[in-house]
Amino acid sequence: MTDREIVELVKGALSKARPDLSGQFESVGIDTRFENIKMDSIDTLQMITFLEDRLGVVFQEEELSKIETVKDLAGLINGR
């Protein structure tokens, strides 16, 4: 997947997890840090679950613990 496709996928996952903040997610880009997005651990879990379902994969917790930016997530997705 291209970085652009992954950014769009992440935006969709974020909007599914927090529809009330979907307007805020329009500014998400490849260098966006997940710590700067106003989501709690439950929201993050919902986002990851959406991505796993959409991509047909299961991310390992140790892989996810290293993810800080959308670019990091793109590397994880493309590295599979």
Image (cartoon, grey):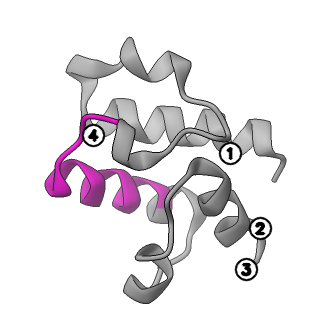
Q: Circle 1 sits on which residue?
A: 6
For numbered disc 2, what is the local secondary structure?
helix
Q: Is residue 21 above or below residue 41?
A: above
Which label sits on residue 37? none
Per the model, the C-alpha gap separating discs 3 and 4 is 24 Å
What amino acid is labelled 1 in the image?
Answer: Ile
Q: Residue 25's x, y, as percent?
A: 44, 23
Badge 3 local density, few (<14 within 10 Å), some, or many (20+)?
A: few
If you read the primary sequence from the N terminus, does the residue marked by circle 1 or circle 3 appear first?
Answer: 1
For numbered disc 3, what is the local secondary structure?
loop
Asked which quadrant contains residue 19, the reply is top left
Per the model, the C-alpha gap separating discs 1 and 4 is 16 Å
Asked which quadrant contains residue 18, the reply is top left
Per the model, the C-alpha gap separating discs 2 and 1 is 9 Å
Q: Circle 2 sits on which residue?
A: 78
Badge 2 local density, few (<14 within 10 Å), some, or many (20+)?
A: few
Q: Circle 3 sits on which residue?
A: 80
Left or right: 54 in relation to 3: left
For the stretch drawn in magenta, the main secondary structure is: helix
Asked if marks 1 and 3 touch (Cβ < 8 Å), the reply is no
For numbered disc 4, what is the local secondary structure?
helix
Q: Is residue 43 above or below residue 49?
A: above
Asked if marks 2 and 1 touch (Cβ < 8 Å), the reply is yes
Please give the range of residues in magenta: 37-51
Q: Is residue 54 above or below residue 23?
A: below
Badge 4 local density, few (<14 within 10 Å), some, or many (20+)?
A: many
Q: Residue 57's x, y, as percent?
A: 55, 75
Nearest the viewer among 49 and 66 is: 66
If you read the primary sequence from the N terminus, does the residue marked by circle 2 or circle 4 appear first?
Answer: 4
